[in-house]
Image: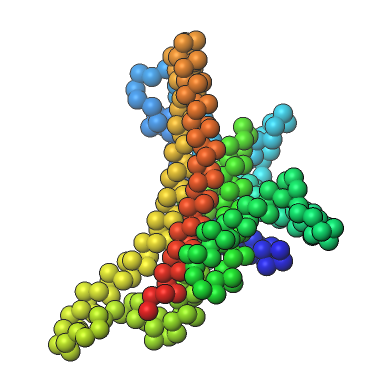
Amino acid sequence: MTRFGRTTLLLLGLALGLSAPGARLHAQEESHKPTSEVAHDLVAPGTQAQANRNQIDIVHHIGNAHEVEIPFLGVYHLPRFAPLHIGGLTIDFSPTKHLVFMLLSAVLVAVVFVTSARAVARAQAQGRPAKGFAGAMEATALYIRQEVILPNVGHHGEGFVPYLLTLFFFILAMNLLGLLPWGATATGNIAVTAALALMAFITIEIAGMRALGAKGYLGTIFYLPPGLPTALKPIMLIIMTPVEIIGKLSKPFALAVRLFANMTAGHVLVLALIGLTFLFQSWVVGGVASILATAIMLLELFVAFLQAFVFTLLTSVFIGLMRAEH
């Protein structure tokens, strides 16, 4: 559990560092437009004013912000820090809504597994298996370890288990918190998913370096098929080197975009269905829209688990492929 906790902090730190500047740049771009112009861009001319407000609420829910909605207490405005200027680059480390829910996810994962580990240890000391919530967490962690991580990472893959388990539960916590009425989905922020994908990319490449050695790792970039005539080697290097580099970069890109797009699309669809009630102001439309939104929310609950599973599975597969590249 100690390695589990250290990996959680490492993932969180990288994600925090990349998500805060991204949120600030997004806010700066939007701040150039007055609210009336933003509403005009979101809805077609001639639409009712109520529809304008509904559209802005959708953007507000899925976007980042410098305030957090606290249930039954209203809106809490997060503190703002002076931006850091490095040459022509401006970086704002002020906390945002997605940052708060990332921290909450990290704390939630840490508390759940520290308490579960203690409960499992007590049960084992008494010579019985863990029961209840602690037993469920132990079973889930063992399933991900035995059925997802080790078979795909390959031989001597135990060293990657703490990182990949942390990755799964950290993403799952962020996904589930986004389904709460006042919650926010941090994985619906491309900066957050990009940070997670960057960490996966670094892990994949370092795993390859350690398993293949310097010469073997360079062969994954400058690829030459065995038995190739000497005259064709320069031509093959010119053709294959960009292909191999693109192949390496496409993996983290796919990880980041897949998680971001899936978590954002579901929320947009649910909010759009609910917005139909206020747009048409009809009990019939409202009833049908509510049923459809409930069905989508149940699907979103499944997607929250699925996307955490897929991200962990693909990272494990990519690590295993890189380690067995020879």
Seen from the viewer's position, the closer of residues 283 and 22 is 283
Percent from the top left, x then y, of residue 245?
A: 33, 70
Q: Is residue 237 above or below residue 27?
A: below
Furthest residue to the left?
231
**Residue 123: which quarter of the image?**
bottom right
Seen from the viewer's position, the closer of residues 253 and 127 is 127
Q: Is residue 220 above or below residue 50?
A: below
Seen from the viewer's position, the closer of residues 310 and 181 is 310
Percent from the top left, x then y, of residue 268?
A: 46, 34
At 62% from the left and 65% from the top, the residue drawn is 162
Q: Is residue 189 visible?
A: no
Q: Is residue 311 visible?
A: yes
**Residue 269: which quarter of the image?**
top left
At 50% from the left and 35% from the top, the residue drawn is 299
Percent from the top left, x then y, of residue 168?
A: 57, 55
At 58% from the left and 48% from the top, the residue drawn is 172
Quadrant where the C terminus is found in the figure: bottom left
At 25% from the left and 74% from the top, the residue drawn is 240
Furthest residue to the bottom?
230
Percent from the top left, x then y, of residue 234?
A: 20, 84
Furthest residue to the top?
283
Q: Is residue 273 above or below residue 244?
A: above
Numbered-mark total: 0
Q: How is the image coloured?
A: rainbow
Seen from the viewer's position, the closer of residues 104 and 146 is 146
Furthest residue to the right?
126
Quadrant where the N terminus is found in the figure: bottom right
